[in-house]
Structures are given as structure tokens and as C-alpha cells.
Amino acid sequence: MRVELRAQGGFAGLRPPPLVLDTDQLEPDVAREVEELAAGLPAGGGAPGRGADLMRYDVVVEDSGERRTAAYFEPEVPEQVRRLLRLGRSGGRRE
């Protein structure tokens, strides 16, 4: 499974490079956690929150030839997405 997380928005409309979690390259317990988080992602969508400099997160999950995408907007970002972001930022290591 491959999970790609793209962020955009925030101060000055930042667009950092995507974070990628490839379960084939992670330790087994972390890979299992990524798979569980990705499988439990709620459907994205909804309207962006009101306010300046709010972030948008696009999540792309590729698994067994299937591809799912969803967008989440601050301040209503699900905990599963926040956890995937933390794992991606730490290089696939638990904090």
C-alpha cells in the first residue's frame, strides 16, 4: 500500500512536497498501522473551514491496483489523517 499526503494553504499558500508512506518500506508494525489508518479514512469532502490561511490535505491511497482520493480541510481534519501526517513527517517512524 502507498499513501501520499499533499498539503496546501497556510501562510503564503505553501505547497510542500508530498509525504509518501509505502508500507513495503516500513517496519511491519508501522506498516500495519498505516494500513489500518488508511482503511478507516472517512470520505473526504465538505467545505473548507472559514478563516485565513487554513490548510487543505489531499490523501491518495493506492492498494492492489485501486486508487482512492479524498480532501480534508482545516479545522475538520480527521484524527486518522493527522496520524498519517505525523508518520509521514517522521519518515515512517513512531514519535
Image: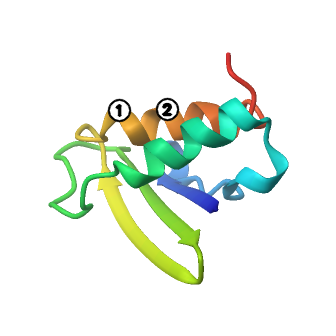
How many marks are shown on the rendered structure?
Answer: 2
- Colour scheme used in the picture? rainbow
Residue placed most toward the observer, 80 or 52: 80
Which quarter of the rendered picture does the C terminus lie within? top right
Which quarter of the rendered picture does the N terminus lie within? bottom right
Residue 17 place in picture, x, y as percent: 71, 58
Q: Which residue is mark 1?
A: 79
In the displayed structure, 40 sits above or below 60; it is above
Q: Amino acid at mark 2?
A: Arg
Do the numbered discs 2 and 1 sit on residues whose CB atoms are within 8 Å? yes
Residue 10 seen in the current view: no
Residue placed most toward the observer, 26 or 90: 26
In the displayed structure, 30 sits above or below 36; it is above
Q: Residue drawn 41% across and 53% down?
A: 39
In the displayed structure, 78 sits above or below 67; it is above
User: Is label 1 in a helix, a strand or a loop?
Assistant: helix
Residue lying furthest top: 95
